[in-house]
Amino acid sequence: MRYRAERIALAVMAGSGIVVVLADLLGWLDELAPGSTLPKVTLLILSTVTLFLLLEFDRLKVLDDVHAQLSKLDIDALARELRQRHYAGVVRVHERFPDDRFATLVDGATREVTILQTWIPNLDEFDRGLRKALLDRQVRVRVLLLHPSSPVAGLRSEALRTVRDPARDGDVRANIEQCLSTLASLVNDAGDEDRARLEVRVYNSLPSVAVYKVDEHYLVSSFLHGRLAIRSTQMEIEGCATVMGREVQREVDTLWSIGCAVDLSDWRGSIGRINL
């Protein structure tokens, strides 16, 4: 009934407009009511429009209710859920290691920074950020490196023999030891409590992936022949509970469990006492 009333009101309004225009052109309006016809017709049309708006008031309120409901939706949460469902947690793929992105993540770290590598070729790029996270914000830092005397170190050196950068294609063992020396310098002047938050372990196993983790974010790459892991494609994963996040975390936990702790205050002696 209401719908019909609206349609009739619209038809009357449209018809009235046409009749008025024709009557005005033919001069009928002046004959019927000289000087007052147009104001009356205008009043009639305005009254019809007002009636139509009153009939539509409830529908306009429905639109407001829809807008209110949409405003309650957490669009970011929905997007995150879709990424987890369709991309297993992968939010971006980088052509190579994104130094700026990782540095930003480290600067915002609140709980944990974990690195799994054979050695860390780009440690100099973010050692200052690690120091601030460790000492200023009390963030736990865990580092897993290949044991410098592991047979895998020789194999990896052979796999990297075609790397063109002479500063980075040296002996894997020497690069691991350089990393250990740099990490030791991070906590040279720190107190016991701060020093305890930096944990370094070495493993004697074949790593499958290189992992740079900050809180819930991962940067993951593979060890390819002739290419450093940081020069390989990087998957950025968001969420420890995602499919990819769980897989990567499981690998990190496995190597951490089989790794041996390194005492950074005497890392050379500590490494020498580890039996492979």
Image (spheres, rainbow, N blue to C red):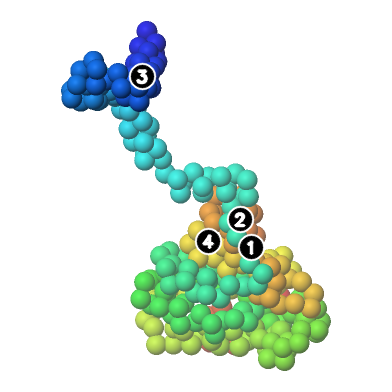
The quadrant holding residue 24 is top left
Residue holding disc 4: 217
User: Reading the chain from its start, which is encountered first: label 1 or label 4?
Assistant: 1
Disc 1 to disc 3: CB gap under 8 Å:
no
Dot 2 amino acid type: Val
At horizontal 80% and vertical 84% (from top left) the residue drawn is: 161
Callout 1: helix, strand or loop?
strand
Q: Position of residue 254 (x, y in %)?
A: 64, 60
Tell me the distance, in whole angstroms, between the alpha carbons under discs 1 and 2: 8 Å
Disc 1 to disc 2: CB gap under 8 Å:
yes
Disc ID at residue 19: 3
Callout 2: helix, strand or loop?
strand
Q: Residues within 10 Å of mark 4 (few under 14, many from 20)?
A: many
Q: Which of labels 3 and 4 is toward the front?
A: 3
Q: Which of labels 2 and 4 is toward the front?
A: 2
Disc ID at residue 90: 2
Callout 4: helix, strand or loop?
strand
Residue 212 shows up from this direction = yes
At horizontal 59% and vertical 65% (from top left) the residue drawn is: 219
Q: Position of residue 203 (x, y in %)?
A: 66, 72
Tell me the distance, in whole angstroms, between the alpha carbons under discs 3 and 2: 66 Å
Q: Which of labels 1 and 3 is toward the front?
A: 3
At horizontal 49% and vertical 44% (from top left) the residue drawn is: 78
Q: Residues within 10 Å of mark 1 (few under 14, many from 20)?
A: some
Q: Position of residue 179 (x, y in %)?
A: 59, 84
Residue holding disc 1: 93
